């Protein structure tokens, strides 16, 4: 089932280690099929370099395995909770990327110090509270904290990003780590100034409606 999404998910998972967003088997991506409503997600504990389309697990929104011989990610319940409450979201990424997770470790959101943040996120990257892995708890914290941002930090844990597609969610995860690294470096030099909200709005509008082809 959903062969194209299995192949897409296998390819996108390779972007996580390629961009230094994950270590060993940590992290995961899921994608929702808009037609069937089924969700394709990474299996638990499988190393990225051996991950293939046939390893992906298909579940329904209640978590019942529709197809797959492996256990789905331990974050599956949280992914499904987000899909259940955000019909605009069709892709979710979870990482422990080091610079962004450093901010998460101390419960600190990332203010808009960079035009790249205004472009991609349209505001600060918020930080939600702490929740244990294995239930809907993380998904609830994500939705409580994320607001209009495509990314949120989870205290003492890591990063969740969402998108209208799986590719958009992966891009947000890559950009989250990129800006987190730059902000961390800037903070070693001094205290950067935040960009004014009205300028953030202008930059975000330009990025969404003018930039690109």
Image (cartoon, rainbow, N blue to C red):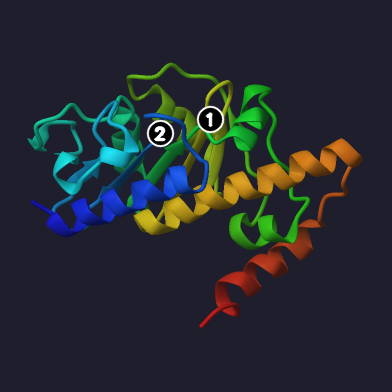
Dots 2 and 1: beta carbons under 8 Å? yes
From the top left corner, tell me how far across and down residue 121 is, in percent: 60, 54
From the top left corner, tell me how far across and down residue 71 is, in percent: 18, 26
Q: Quadrant of residue 26?
A: top left
Figure disc tally: 2
Q: Residues within 10 Å of mark 2 (few under 14, many from 20)?
A: many
Furthest residue in direction bottom, as rendered: 213
Q: Residues within 10 Å of mark 1 (few under 14, many from 20)?
A: many
Instruction: Indicate which disc, 2 or 1, sits on the residue closer to the N terminus.
Output: 2
The disc at residue 27 is 2
Q: Secondary structure at mark 2?
A: loop
Q: Nearer the viewer, residue 20 or 163?
A: 20
Vertically, is 90 above or below 85?
A: below
Q: Can residue 59 be seen from the camera position used here?
A: no
Q: Quote the CA–CA distance across marks 2 and 1.
A: 9 Å
* Residue positioned 45% across, 42% down in the render: 17
Q: Nearer the viewer, mark 2 or mark 1?
A: 2
* Residue positioned 64% across, 57% down in the render: 122
Q: Secondary structure at mark 1?
A: strand
From the top left corner, tell me how far across and down residue 62 is, in percent: 18, 32
Q: Quadrant of residue 183?
A: top right
* Residue positioned 21% across, 45% down in the render: 52
Q: Nearer the viewer, residue 102 or 65?
A: 102
Q: Quadrant of residue 106?
A: top right
* Residue positioned 40% across, 22% down in the render: 137
Query: Which residue is disc 1 drawn over?
Result: 158
- State left or right for residue 113 relative to residue 149: right
- State left or right for residue 130 relative to residue 136: right
Q: Can residue 179 be seen from the camera position used here?
A: yes
Vertically, is 15 above or below 135?
A: below
The disc at residue 75 is none
């Amino acid at each position: 089932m959903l062969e194209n999404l299995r192949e897409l998910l296998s390819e996108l998972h390779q972007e996580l280690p390629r961009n230094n967003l994950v270590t060993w088997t940590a992290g995961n991506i899921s994608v929702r099929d808009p037609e069937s409503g089924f969700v394709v997600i990474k299996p638990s504990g499988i190393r990225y370099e051996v991950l293939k389309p046939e390893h992906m697990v298909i579940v329904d929104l209640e978590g019942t395995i529709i197809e797959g011989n492996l256990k789905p990610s331990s974050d599956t319940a949280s992914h499904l909770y987000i899909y259940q409450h955000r019909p605009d979201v069709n892709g979710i990424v979870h990482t422990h990327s080091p610079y962004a997770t450093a901010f998460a470790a101390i419960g600190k959101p990332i203010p808009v110090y960079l035009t790249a943040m205004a472009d991609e996120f349209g505001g600060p990257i918020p930080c939600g509270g702490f929740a244990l892995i294995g239930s809907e708890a993380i998904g609830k914290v994500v939705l409580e904290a994320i607001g209009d941002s495509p990314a949120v930090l989870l205290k003492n844990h890591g990063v969740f990003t969402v998108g209208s597609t799986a590719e958009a969610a992966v891009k947000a995860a890559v950009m989250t780590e990129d800006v987190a690294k730059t902000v961390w470096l800037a903070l070693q030099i001094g205290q950067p100034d935040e960009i004014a909200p009205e300028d953030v709005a202008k930059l975000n509008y330009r990025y969404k409606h003018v930039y690109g082809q």
